[in-house]
Image (cartoon, rainbow, N blue to C red):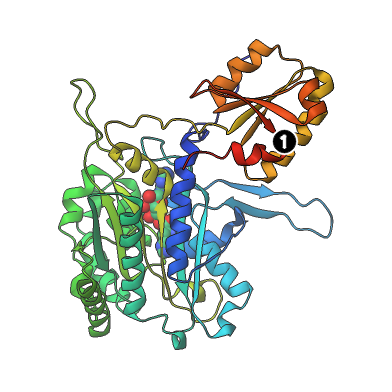
Amino acid sequence: MTSLKAVRGTRDLLPPETELWNRVEATARRVFARYNFGEIRTPIFEDTSLFARGVGEETDIVSKEMYTWEDRARAQSEKSQSLTLRPENTAGVVRAYIEHKLGDTGLLQKLYYIGPQFRRERPQKGRYRQFWQIGAEVIGPPSAGSESPLRDAEVLEMLASFLDELGITGWTLVLNSVGSASDRPKYVAALREALAPVKGRMSPDNQRRAETNPLRVLDSKDPADEAIIATLPKIADYLDDESKAHFAAVCAALDACGVKYGINPRLVRGLDYYTRTTFEFTVGGLSPQRAGAPGTPILGAQNALLGGGRYDGLSEMLGGPKAPGIGFAMGLDRLILTLQAQAEGAPEKSAPVLADAFLAPLGAALDAPALSLARHLRRQGLRIELGDGAFRLKKSFEIANKLARNIILLGEDEHASGILTVKNFATGEQTKIPRDQLAQALQPPE
Ligand code: HAM
């Protein structure tokens, strides 16, 4: 029988690497709390039409990359339904905003999420079919200030602070404005006109998009079409005065707080819901060199650490009230790759954390008392590895030496007297410690 493996594009995350994942997540929670965000958890699968309507039928995500299935009705009262594993979380958050009438509070909703997303992309370094995002959304009625450029700048400043606090160096922020819903028709008309004489030379996907959704031609990663795309009109030339003023205000607020950025007039991002501000943070740089081999880019061909933007019409596209918003999502897998590559020396695995003690019952009759003692110590906050009364003493010592700083021996005498024998592996010292002083004695060194 062939052995079972994790499915292509998915992988297992194991200790001690998961400690780094937890550290990144804890840093995000800590930083976001300072900006008064709360956590939202939405389901991992949703009705397919949420993504078709929200993200857009002609995007790569919806047209090629979703995991979609027909969920058959199980009872007469149920209908079969097309369901999809979420490829991103913004549409789900806005659905929840509408469903729970969060706009009725009249306040801005500042929500963050951490969780897996699914896209059937071609797997490569930094690109997986199940990947993790840490994201956040700021959404609310216009009266709550949700359209204000200050919100955009605050989100970008928060991201800059988060990356700095995490210790990621050499990041770059690029911004653009893709204009409002009223700027869009003029620009799309100009794109169509420019594409008409040249589209016949483009890839079949782009020929179709030139008809159905010309903006998506700009996301094309097809190298053969790059030269044509470079000649197409730029959206910046089609912004109305309000959109220009909004973008200028975002830039001015960033200047005022010293967050550096560049402007890329081609940054339209591959999702249909964006209006006005769009942005990406990238990291360049190479992984540390190994014995003579040339360094490779930290994120392979994927240099976007995170992306986001404004989506002033998304709620209405999903049948909700007017609720402008702005948000972002970071690729957690890519943050980890970057931290590992930037860590001193090389991406070596960090040393495993040692337990405070290995508790060895000396004989099966002492298993139950050992569990009771382990419970007592764990409740005092200690990290305890519980052995097994069936193990010979030598075996207990061998395991304990790998996993823990100390070994506690629980034999008949110790059980009867309540005085335990403890050996510290670092000093080699063996001591007798009464049960009620054990927790104190085993505290890890500062
Ligand atoms: P996105 O640009 O599609 O935007 O994804 C955001 C980030 O998720 C990317 O910059 C990347 O770091 C990570 N990512 C995407 N696909 C993969 C993959 N296959 N493997 C590993 N990492 C990946 C969104 O998802 C929007 N919902 C962001 C947003 C929130 N816009 C407004 N609010």
The quadrant of the picture occupied by the N terminus is top right
Q: In percent of the image, x 78 and y 35: which residue is there?
A: 372
Q: Is residue 155 left or right of residue 255?
A: right
Q: Secondary structure at mark 1?
A: helix
Q: Quadrant of residue 136?
A: bottom left
Q: Quadrant of residue 174?
A: bottom left
Task: Tell me the residue at 47%/75% (across/down).
Answer: 139
Decide: few, some or many residues near mark 1? Use Cα within 10 Å; few <14, some 14-19, many ≥20. Answer: some
- Percent position (x, y) of residue 315? 50, 74
Residue under pointer 1: 435
Is residue 10 shown above or below 184? above
Residue 430 x/y as whole percent: 59, 22
Q: Is residue 31 above or below residue 177?
A: above
Toward the bottom, the furthest residue is: 143
Classify residue 41 as left or right of residue 226: right
Q: Nearer the viewer, residue 125 or 357?
A: 357
Q: What amino acid does circle 1 point to? A: Arg
From the viewer's side, name the closer residue of 303 and 183: 303
Q: Is residue 425 above or below residue 94?
A: above
Q: Residue at x 75, y 58 (%)?
A: 79
Residue 241 rendering spot, x and y as whole percentages: 22, 84
Between residues 206 and 265, which one lies in front from this camera angle?
A: 265
Asked whether mark 1 and ligand 1 are closer than 8 Å, the reply comes as: no
